[in-house]
Amino acid sequence: MDKIQTQKLRLGVNIDHVATIRNARGGLHPDPVEAARLAARAGADGITAHLREDRRHISDRDIERLMQDIDLPLNLEMAATGEMLAIALRHRPHACCLVPEKREELTTEGGLDVASGHNHLKPFVRELVAAGIRVSMFIDPEPAQADAARSIGAQVVEFHTGTWCEAVIEGDQALVKAELARLSRAVSHAAGLGLEVHAGHGLSYDSVKPVAAMAEIVELNIGHFLVGEAIFCGLEASIRQMRALMDEARAQQTATAGAPG
Ligand code: PXP
């Protein structure tokens, strides 16, 4: 059987919104580092945290503690700014995912426009890669964005699944089909370029399986839904359930790919 079909799909648990709840009262509880420990026990393969310019959730101290106390690889999401580059080079996390950032946005609204911004982004990629950090670009599911990411030396692309998740929530079947096809085309294109392919943003129990079934994707990064669902069933249970749905989708895909045609 070919390698892609048997590859395990990794789950990166994004703990930003544990920090959002903590920061609502300015104290220490709930602790995102404790959430990262629990995520490891629940089957996460990595921890993702976004250190935003305005520090609205994750703090500098959180990043320091995640690097010191957690054995799982850290994927640091950051804007391409001098301040963030210096922080990344000081901590040397396993990976950095470059994301667009606007102060007024509620969340990362779309992917990075690498195709237009490659001159600005290239030196960041070069310095991070030279420091031994895997560099990922958070982009919309467009082949041209993957081409641009590869051309500036990124090893990984993470496709923004926001429009796919919105289509699932709206329940418009034509849109659901179109968004899934758009994502699938971009994933195959990026994998064909030799890029490692990740995906994430907005994924829930309802939207994760068709994405997890795409054999070229090696990692999903999921946060907000898991933390929200934890209110009802606990964080460990929400992560375990997500992990189970991902594994189920991947197993079904593998069985279909291996079945005689
Ligand atoms: N991947 C990236 C690059 C992100 O910026 C985010 C949101 O911080 C996520 C994944 C996770 O998105 P969500 O919290 O909606 O699951």
Image: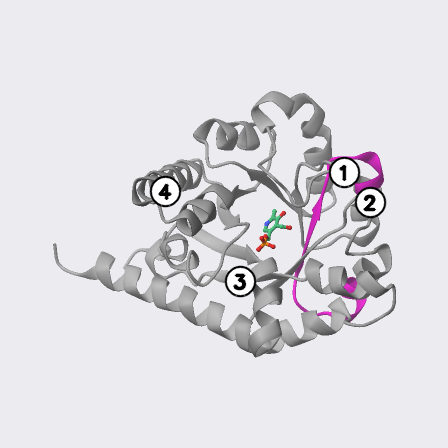
Going from N to C along the chain, the mark reached first, 3 or 1, is: 3
Q: Which residue is mark 1?
A: 103
Q: Is residue 67 highlighted in magenta?
A: yes
> Disc 3 beta carbon < 8 A from ligand 1?
no
> Disc 4 beta carbon < 8 A from ligand 1?
no
> What amino acid is found at the position of numbered circle 2 in the picture?
Asp
Mark 1, other Cα within 10 Å: few <14 / some 14–19 / many ≥20: few
> Disc 1 beta carbon < 8 A from ligand 1?
no
Q: Which residue is mark 4?
A: 184
> What amino acid is found at the position of numbered circle 3 in the picture?
Leu
Mark 3, other Cα within 10 Å: few <14 / some 14–19 / many ≥20: many
User: Given the current orientation, which residue lies at the most extreme left position?
Assistant: 261
Tell me the CA gap for discs 1 and 4. 31 Å
* Proximity of marks 2 and 1: CB atoms separated by less than 8 Å: yes
Tell me the CA gap for discs 4 and 2. 34 Å
Instruction: Point out which mark residue 132 bears.
Output: none
* Proximity of marks 3 and 4: CB atoms separated by less than 8 Å: no
The residue segment tinted magenta is 66-84
Going from N to C along the chain, the mark reached first, 2 or 3, is: 3
Q: Secondary structure at mark 2?
A: loop
Q: Which residue is mark 2?
A: 54
Q: Which residue is mark 3?
A: 11
> Residue at position x 69%, y 74% from top?
37
In the displayed structure, 88 sits above or below 39; it is above
In the displayed structure, 180 sits above or below 189; it is below
Percent from the top left, x then y, of residue 174?
30, 40
Tell me the CA gap for discs 2 and 3. 27 Å
> Residue at position x 58%, y 77% from top?
236
Going from N to C along the chain, the mark reached first, 3 or 4, is: 3
> Residue at position x 65%, y 76% from top?
38
